Image (cartoon, rainbow, N blue to C red):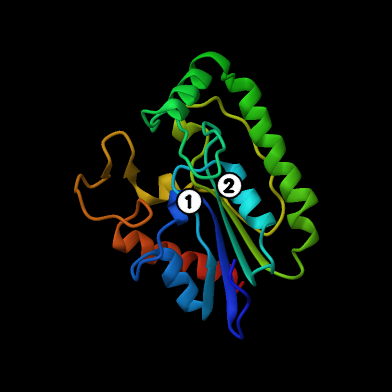
Amino acid sequence: MEQRTSRNTIGFFGDSFCAESTNTSWTTLLADKLQADIVNVGRGGSSIWTAILDFLDTNNIPDYLIFCWTNPRRLYHPTKIATPRNIEKSNFGDAAERHFAYLWNERKENLNYKWTLEHFDQSVLSKIKEKTKIIQVFSFTPEDVNSKHFDVALKTGEIIKESLTQFSGYDFKNQLTHNGTDEKLNNHMSIQKNQELADYLYSKCIH
């Protein structure tokens, strides 16, 4: 992570919903509104462990922390993507595919997801909440990925109830926005949705 500058800093930790930082991305728009330098962005196809480990590897805690928690159906790897829908053709991909076919247990993984995030929230984030503004949002809810419903009890910072999938209007099955267009998307969102999300989170950051 980059060293802190004289300006505020903001870190985005999560998956593809916060991975892009083009001029029209909500990450850039929010950082500009806060007059903050971006010191971390998410990684597409990553698991919750990527976000957690990226944060734990930071040298300085950013002034603003935005966590976009992805869904439970992802394996952790430091550089590769391992999701049921996106597995490369390689020895690694073969191992990941076999894991999902023979070792994956949804009940166990949902509990692992729930308890990992709750522990991180209560044992790590709760201890730094006086030093930084924290916002936590789910990129996907269990319903978004047709998983059995389970509650994740997060308490630290601002907890956004609506998932980014629901907010964005993105149709992952057909890879289209809900209005049926193939508009170029940033972080799975239209330009308008990127702006709306930046405005909304800005109101939470200054609240």
Which residue matches tag 2? 50
In the rendered view, would you say 199 is above or below 43?
A: below
Report, in whole angstroms, how far the alpha carbon at label 1 lies from the one at label 2. Answer: 8 Å
Pick the quarter of the image with the C terminus. bottom right
Q: Residue at x 55, y 25 (%)?
A: 148
In the image, taking residue 181 as reference, residue 170 lies left or right, namely: right
Camera sees residue 199: yes
- The amino acid type of the residue labelled 1 equals Arg
Which residue matches tag 1? 43
- Dividing the picture into quarters, in which one does residue 9 lie? bottom right
Number of marks in the image? Answer: 2
Q: Position of residue 22 (x, y in %)?
A: 36, 67
Q: Secondary structure at mark 1?
A: loop
State yes or no: discs 1 and 2 in contact (Cβ < 8 Å): yes
Pick the quarter of the image with the N terminus. bottom right
Camera sees residue 153: no
Q: Position of residue 183 (x, y in %)?
A: 21, 54
Q: Position of residue 112 (x, y in %)?
A: 67, 31
Q: Position of residue 14 (x, y in %)?
A: 53, 51
Q: Residue at x 67, y 28 (%)?
A: 111
Specify which label sits upstream in the sequence, 1 or 2: 1
